């Protein structure tokens, strides 16, 4: 099993990187554990999450929707 941990939340990440402790509530709310069968799946997930950093919302487009957008 390949485990990936993420700390979510701008304020919480900034605190963590500055060496400031997080509250137990912050840890419970903002730390997430994801499990994958292979290292390749885990790495793909990490890349996907990192690609989304800074965006507030996204939508998974189907091939048909892509074709409609490309005039």
Image: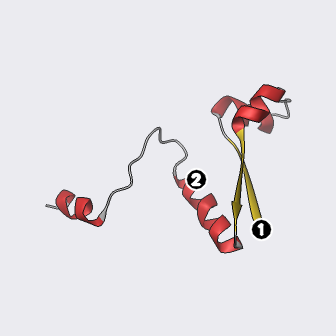
Residue 12 against residue 68 in the figure, above or below: above
Numbered-mark total:
2
Provide the residue designation for mark 1.
1
Q: Residue at x 44, y 41 (%)?
A: 57
Residue 12 as seen in the image, left or right of residue 63: right
Q: Residue at x 65, y 73 (%)?
A: 40
Alpha-carbon span between mark 1 and mark 2: 19 Å
Name the residue: 80% across, 34% down.
18
Q: Going by the image, does 67 lie left or right of 54?
A: left
Q: Give residue 25's position: percent from left, percent from top.
A: 78, 26
Q: Nearer the viewer's eye, disc 1 or disc 2?
A: 1
Task: Estimate how packed mark 2 is, as few (under 14), some (14 to 19) or many (20 or more) residues with alpha carbons within 10 Å.
Answer: few
24 to the left or right of 44: right
Q: Secondary structure at mark 1?
A: loop
| Quarter of the picture holding the N terminus | bottom right
When asked about the image quadrant of residue 43, the answer is bottom right
Mark 2 secondary-structure assignment: helix
Q: Residues within 10 Å of mark 1 (few under 14, many from 20)?
A: few
28 vs 36: above or below: above
* Residue picked out by circle 2: 49
Q: Position of residue 26 (x, y in %)?
A: 75, 29
Q: Assess whether mark 2 and mark 1 are in contact (beta carbons under 8 angstroms).
A: no
Which of these two is toward me, 69 or 64? 64
Residue 10 horizontal/vertical position (percent)? 64, 33
Rendering colour mode: secondary structure
Q: Earlier in the sequence, mark 1 or mark 2?
A: 1
Say which of 18 and 68 sits in front: 68
At x 71% / y 60%, what residue is drawn? 35
Q: Quadrant of the C terminus?
A: bottom left
Residue 14 - label? none
């Amino acid at each position: 099993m390949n485990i990936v941990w993420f700390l979510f939340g701008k304020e919480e990440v900034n605190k963590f990187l500055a060496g400031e402790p997080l509250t137990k509530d912050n840890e419970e709310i903002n730390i997430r554990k994801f499990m994958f069968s292979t290292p390749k799946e885990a790495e793909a997930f990490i890349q996907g999450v990192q690609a989304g950093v800074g965006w507030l919302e996204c939508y998974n487009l189907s091939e048909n929707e892509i074709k409609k957008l490309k005039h």
